[in-house]
Image: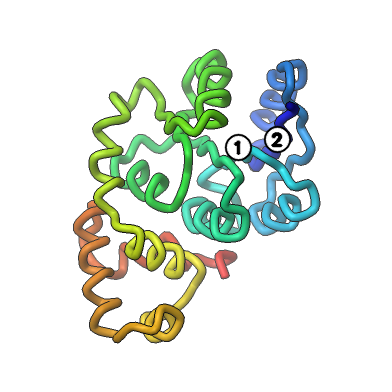
Amino acid sequence: MTTRLAIAEDHALIREGLKSLLAHVPDLEIVADTGDGAKVEQLLAQTQADLLLLDLDLPGCHGIALAARIKQQHPAIKILILTGSTDHASVIQAFAAGADGYLLKHEDSSELLEAIPAVLKNTRYISKLLGPIDNFQECSEQVTPREQQILKLIAAGQSTQQIADTLEVSILTVRKHRQNLMQKLALHNAVELTRYALRPGTE
């Protein structure tokens, strides 16, 4: 069965390099590519991609917030993050938002070819340079399903009151979940929790 692949990467040289590398991979078809974060969701709706290679630093959006929204809209799609960020909190946040893999751009191309089939087989993948996946799974798996739901709603731009209304819970309950998320996601305050999800272009 052919896997339909979309690539979201703003650096043209990297994007073209990925397309060249992956063009001849068996059972893999590149159906879309873009360097504009604002166009990713539209392209996924049009192409029904199975796998998205997603740069965290696309112009016009915030990558982790975008990943969370995509998972809300297309739960079956696999998302493999491509980034230069080795920050521990970014890895945890990406997995908590629904990413299936986290790959550093300065890894060898052979690791990308290893990561793609791994995530397609429902195995979380992380760059070898970042250490064992267990280091990050232990943290991200502590996030409860309800907390993951709230994280996705934050990423979608909802306020505390809107989240409370959507989930039919009290504002105090939402605030408690936000506090738990800050602790589990290695964030220092509520501003950091919402900042990555509420940047321009993430509505």
How dense is the environment of label 1, judged by Cα within 10 Å: few (below 14), some, or many (20 and up)?
many
Relative to 111, residue 193 above or below: below
Relative to 113, residue 55 above or below: below
- Front residue of 60/26: it is 26
Picture quadrant where residue 170 is located: bottom left
Q: Secondary structure at mark 1?
A: strand
How dense is the environment of label 2, judged by Cα within 10 Å: few (below 14), some, or many (20 and up)?
many
- Front residue of 139/53: it is 139
Which amino acid type is shown beneath numbered disc 2? Leu
- Residue under the image location 48 percent in, 39 percent down: 100
Are circles 2 and 1 on residues that touch, CB within 8 Å? Answer: yes
The percent position of residue 67, horizontal first and vertical second, equals 53, 52
- Residue under the image location 76 percent in, 32 percent down: 30
Which amino acid type is shown beneath numbered disc 1? Leu
Cα distance between the residues tagged 2 and 1: 8 Å
Residue where numbered disc 1 is placed: 53
Q: Quadrant of the C terminus?
A: bottom right
Mark 2 / mark 1, whichever is N-terminal: 2
Residue where numbered disc 2 is placed: 5
